Image (spheres, coloured by chain):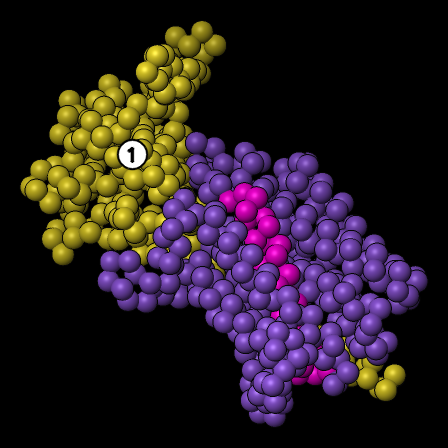
Amino acid sequence: MAQAMGFYTDTTVCIGCKACQVACHQWNGLPAELAEQPTATRPGKSLPITGNSYDNTGSFSDVNWRHVKFIEQSARPDRSDLRWLMMSDVCKHCVNAPCLEVCPTGAIIRTEFDSVYIQQSTCNGCRACVSACPFGVIHMGGTENTGQGTAKKCTLCYDRLQNGLQPACATVCPTASIQFGPIEDLKKRAQQRVADLKATGQTKAQLYGADERILGGLNSFYLLVDEPETYGLPRHPQLPSRSVRASSLFSIGSAILLGLAALLSCRRRGEETE
Amino acid sequence: MARITVAPAWEWWLVWYFFLGGLAAGLYCTAALIELMGTARDREMAKVADYLALPLALVCAVLLILDLGRPERFWHMLIQSETGRLMFKYWSPMSMGAWALFVFGGVAFLSFVGVLAEDGRLGLGRWRGVASTWRHGTLGVGFAVLRAGVGFFVAAYTGVLLVASNQPLWSDTRLLGALFLASAVATGTALMLLLRLRSAAPASLARLQWLNAWALVLELVLLVGFFLSLGALATPLLQSSYGRMLMGVTGLLGLVIPLVLRLVQGWSKWVTALACVLVLIGSFEMRYSILMAAQHLGLAGR
């Protein structure tokens, strides 16, 4: 395997410009999300605004593989102390990926860059990965050029990586909020940045997913200046397989009890009536 | 814990699959238990499963395939499309389930052909002797154990599949596999009783009624356990229509009333028939509520 590659997203320098969203759409041929598609005689209709700050997509979707979040924080009623937390969210390319774990067709693979990739020609749209992803990243859908009825998410621009380029979003990010590179280098850079922020009084500065505690590590990890929940990130995301053993044992226990019940039923009535 | 999960949109196709698949598996493992522990006269009851398991399994396969985003690629569950090798992931409940259904279909086919031969239908009567060897002696016991095993697996794996996710409610309990299994046996025995109420020997009916009652007791215990295992999430569930239906239709109508009816009225035929219908309705509702509540209650934010 080549070196593990990924994103380090420093949310403190994100300015919410959404260039990453646009670049992602452009490179991957993802259409704009419209309330009504244009026809030969009528123009299409754009979606209504979300009403959630400057958030224009609201969430990930089959055509939105990046989602810039805007979190408005204010303690005063007149909001004169308003601060924005902005974060460009994307697939975390988990080291222990829930989606990859449950995928029954082998469509989801780990690439030589340690990223998690959905092979569109193999996916049959069972949606087990949608159910398993603790970050709500994967959506079903697709357009003519990206394959219909299959699972969709960020590919870490696998095609670009194979050709020596870096992902489109990181390329266009004007503030270096999204940084791409070898994970080990990114971690060192991020840890230094946390130390610098703490030195300037940002006591809540922390890395999310840079160590193994979260799903073995996230190959797209974040520098946050508030708790993960504030950014809509789960504090303890877990693998689906955590519960398979216990669930199976309860099921086997049930089966044994039912077998015993059958034995009891047969014995008892057999004696009484035959 | 903040949740930002997306619902997999497992809706009506899967509600019906969960119910009919559970019914097929429940019928089938009940028949296997009868073969292993019952008398020769109980065979008439087991025949119901031999006739119904295959058609039900085929309906289930159609439902599952139609639910896929790309139905024509259903075979990717069993064979790697890129290499042609077998696709098998023992740690993925859906992969295991796909294989279990495949094996279930094969075994149910053998049972179906066997029961046609046994009853001399479709010109298969001359194979009656061969079919008989499958049900007697060591081979018969081995086949019955295989049937019980694959039946139990198909009945329970759907619950384990839901638990092995990150969805609210489903992943907060460990009891869905056991609950679905008990419900499958309850519905399997209920349908067998309904279809053989007039024709079966009283002793055979009584044995099955006892097994049905035990399965209902186990299901009731597991349903209560399911609510308790949800912790704080039990409150929003109970306040929703899904939770109320789970309590009223599944718990009360489908479990408590059938059990009470039997305690009060004994084993009379009309009581059994009514109880069996209620059990079937309750089981369908349980699968509906559990599938839909996790996806539509808004328990996951963004």
Residue B161 lies in the magenta-colored region: no
For mark 1, what is the residue?
A144
**Image coordinates for residue A173, horizontal then vertical, percent:** 17, 25
**Relative to A78, A116 lies left or right:** left
**Image coordinates for residue B156, horizontal then vertical, percent:** 56, 63
**Shade representing chain A:** yellow
**Shade representing chain B:** purple
**Relative to B60, A139 lies left or right:** left
Pick the residue in front: B248 or B197. B197
Residue B30 lies in the magenta-colored region: yes
- The residue at the point 58 percent across, 75 percent down is B113
Pick the residue in front: B222 or B276. B276
Q: Which residue is most to the left?
A: A164
Pick the residue in front: A59 or B22. B22
**Relative to B155, B97 lies left or right:** left
Mark 1: which amino acid?
A: Glu
Q: Which residues are magenta?
A: B10-38
**Image coordinates for residue A219, horizontal then vertical, percent:** 24, 45
Pick the residue in front: A34 or A252. A34
**Image coordinates for residue A61, horizontal then vertical, percent:** 36, 32
The answer to whether residue B299 is seen in the rendering is yes
- The residue at the point 59 percent across, 63 percent down is B55
Q: Main secondary structure of the magenta part?
A: helix
Badge 1: chain ID: A
